[in-house]
């Protein structure tokens, strides 16, 4: 399969998996946009392998091993999977570290082995595999690798990952038997796993989610200056990442930190509002 055919397939996957991707990076140069599609397709398929509900844990681990081996083969010019061929082309042309792509595979291996976390620090270690590599891939496509902007990207990605956890507490437990709330924090507030199965959050759980959401918000705010430190044509997209995460934080707060009774999600209208707000503030020269 040619690189062009592989990239076309990667573009199809972005359309099939995410209705919002066609408007992402719309103002970016064509080659940047094409590379973002290839990176997105790689991330999407990697997560799909890790979350395959019909397979056993051992089958998923074997599939992840084969996927990582296929990535290395594609980087060496021996690949046969279109998504991996497209990703390998980006890695070679942009000189991206392969270990960021490997970390995402490892995050999905961790998901097969770990379903409970002891401390907040342990959760941040997991984010260094599941979240920050994606931000670093995006920066790499933009030709950015300096420590300052990488650190801001890491903070943003950690915040997004954390707030996603607190948005999906019930779903993660019911569908994947995963609890990302650290045991240490649950013990501190007197919250048990059974409390997460209740129809609504208890006062203690609300206070726990308040604390965890505050941590996520702090990371998002810390990383927010990144939007003014990237090429102008992608500033809106970078600002939208932060705006989306902060919107969820605000929505969780508006629900009195009960994400058990109802999952906060922006929907199409909410996403449109965030986009309009970011553009408006950027046009005014203010903060997005």
Image (spheres, rainbow, N blue to C red):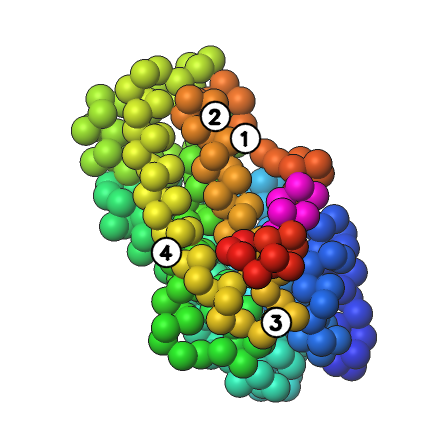
Q: Residues within 10 Å of mark 1 (few under 14, many from 20)?
A: many
Asked whether 274 or 93 is in front, the reply is 274
Tell me where residue 150 appears, x and y as whole percent.
41, 70
Q: Quadrant of the N terminus?
A: bottom right
Of callouts 1 and 2, which one flags the residue occurring earlier in the amino acid sequence? 2
C-alpha span from label 4 to label 1: 23 Å
Of callouts 4 and 2, which one flags the residue occurring earlier in the amino acid sequence? 4
Which residue matches tag 3? 232
Q: Is residue 126 visible?
A: no
Q: From what the image shows, is residue 223 above or below residue 191?
A: below
Q: Start and end of the magenta stretch?
A: 272-278
Tell me where residue 196 appears, x and y as whole percent.
39, 22
Location of residue 155 (image quadrant): bottom left
Q: Residues within 10 Å of mark 4 (few under 14, many from 20)?
A: some
Q: Name the mark on residue 222.
A: 4
Q: Residue at x 74, y 48 (%)?
A: 19
What predominant SS class does the magenta segment belong to? helix
Is 76 situated left or right of 26 in this image? left
Of callouts 4 and 3, which one flags the residue occurring earlier in the amino acid sequence? 4
Of callouts 3 and 2, which one flags the residue occurring earlier in the amino acid sequence? 3
Which residue matches tag 2? 254
């Amino acid at each position: 399969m040619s690189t062009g055919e592989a990239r076309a397939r990667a573009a199809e996957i972005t359309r099939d998996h995410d209705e919002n991707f066609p408007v992402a990076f719309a103002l970016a140069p064509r080659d940047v946009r094409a590379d973002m599609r290839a990176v997105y397709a790689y991330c999407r398929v990697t997560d799909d392998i890790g979350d395959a509900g019909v397979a056993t844990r051992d089958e998923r681990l074997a599939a992840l091993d084969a996927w990582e081996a296929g990535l290395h083969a594609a980087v060496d010019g021996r690949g046969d999977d279109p998504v991996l061929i497209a990703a390998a082309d980006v890695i070679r042309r942009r000189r991206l570290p392969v270990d960021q792509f490997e970390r995402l595979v490892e995050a999905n291996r961790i998901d097969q082995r770990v379903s409970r976390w002891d401390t907040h620090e342990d959760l941040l270690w997991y984010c260094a595999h599941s979240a920050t590599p994606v931000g670093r891939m995006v920066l790499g496509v933009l030709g950015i690798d300096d420590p300052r902007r990488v650190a801001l990207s890491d903070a943003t990605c950690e915040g997004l990952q954390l707030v996603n956890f607190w948005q999906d507490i019930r779903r993660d437990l019911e569908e994947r038997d995963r609890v990302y709330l650290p045991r240490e924090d649950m013990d501190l507030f007197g919250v048990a796993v059974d409390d997460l199965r209740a129809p609504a959050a208890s006062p203690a759980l609300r206070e726990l989610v308040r604390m965890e959401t505050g941590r996520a918000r702090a990371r998002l705010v810390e990383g927010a200056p990144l939007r003014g430190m990237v090429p102008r044509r992608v500033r809106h997209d970078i600002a939208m990442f932060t705006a989306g995460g902060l919107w969820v934080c605000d929505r969780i707060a508006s629900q009195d930190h009960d994400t058990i009774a109802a999952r906060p999600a922006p929907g199409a209208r909410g996403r449109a509002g965030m986009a309009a707000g970011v553009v408006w503030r950027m046009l005014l020269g203010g903060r997005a």
